[in-house]
Amino acid sequence: MKQLREPMALLGAALLSLLVLVAVLAPVIAPYDPRDAVGPSLQAPTFAHLLGTNDLGQDIFSQILWGTRPSLLVGVGAATVAVGVGIAVGVGAGLRGGLADTVAMRVVDVFLALPVLPLLVLIAALVGAGRATLVLVIGLVRWPEVARLTRGQTLSLRCRGYVEASREFGGGLGYVVRRHLLPALGPLITSSFVNVGAIAVLMEAGLAFLGLGDTTVISWGLMLNRALLFPGLYYSALWTWWVLPAGFAISLAVLGFTFLGVGLEPRFNPGWRRTKL
């Protein structure tokens, strides 16, 4: 598709493809087990340890590679939950109308009014922040935006002649959604998925940085948390190989999702194309 040749979309797709490849091949390309002490503590970068070691003698480069997995899994998982719930609520409300639409939108308003970060911190502190919990919680706090967007689009689509004709000829709700609405909502669904994915990666790293992440896995946020607890970190060159790589990796993942979303905007938003003409 011509629109996919947009430089931003290509750059975003390339970054995400690289991160997915690293996540899949981490056991093969990581030189050491990220949990093993494989060298002197706080060793500067060398050929044996490309990004040096932390205070426990663990290889930081190996931890960066393995940290790709939880970040992408949480990002994709939370985006799937948010988009799935948002589509179900938005499409259902838009098609049903009436009382169902009113109640659904009031629920959406309540969720949109909730302070997201304090809510995440509270749930993580009370329930624990396992990977499944993070996916579920982040997904459930991001679905209202998707629901509101899909509801508005559904209200527009249901007035189209082919949708009304399908319903007049006896097409059930499931048939109309599957045959007509979902294909038309495809661009919006894709854009929402990419946007929520970027936010979820950042939230997962933020919770781990605050010490509320899953401590049983190696993650970029947890690496930052451990590094910044080390006394005198910024009084030496330690931060250049212990803090910067993890921060750079988080930025790379978020930029990958963001570039892809921005690059796909001309295809998914006709109004954007009209303003560019």
Image (cartoon, grey):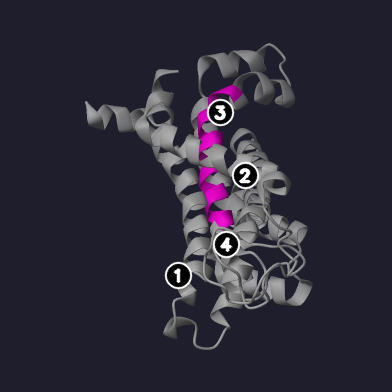
Amino acid type of the residue tagged 3 in the rendering: Gly
- The residue wearing badge 2 is 22
Q: Is residue 145 visible?
A: yes
Which residue occupies 56% across, 37% down?
17
Q: Could you tell me residue 36's position as x and y percent?
A: 75, 66
Q: Check if residue 244 falls in the magenta segment.
A: no
Q: Mark 2 to mark 4: distance in Å?
A: 21 Å
- Mark sitting earlier along the chain (1/3): 3
- The residue wearing badge 1 is 240
Q: Which quarter of the image is occupied by the C terminus?
A: top left
Q: Which mark is residue 203?
A: 4
- At mark 4, the secondary structure is helix
- The residue wearing badge 3 is 186
Judge depth for marks 4 and 3 and give the one in front: 4
- Mark sitting earlier along the chain (3/2): 2
- At mark 3, the secondary structure is helix
Which residue occupies 45% across, 49% down?
255
Magenta segment, which residues? Answer: 183-201
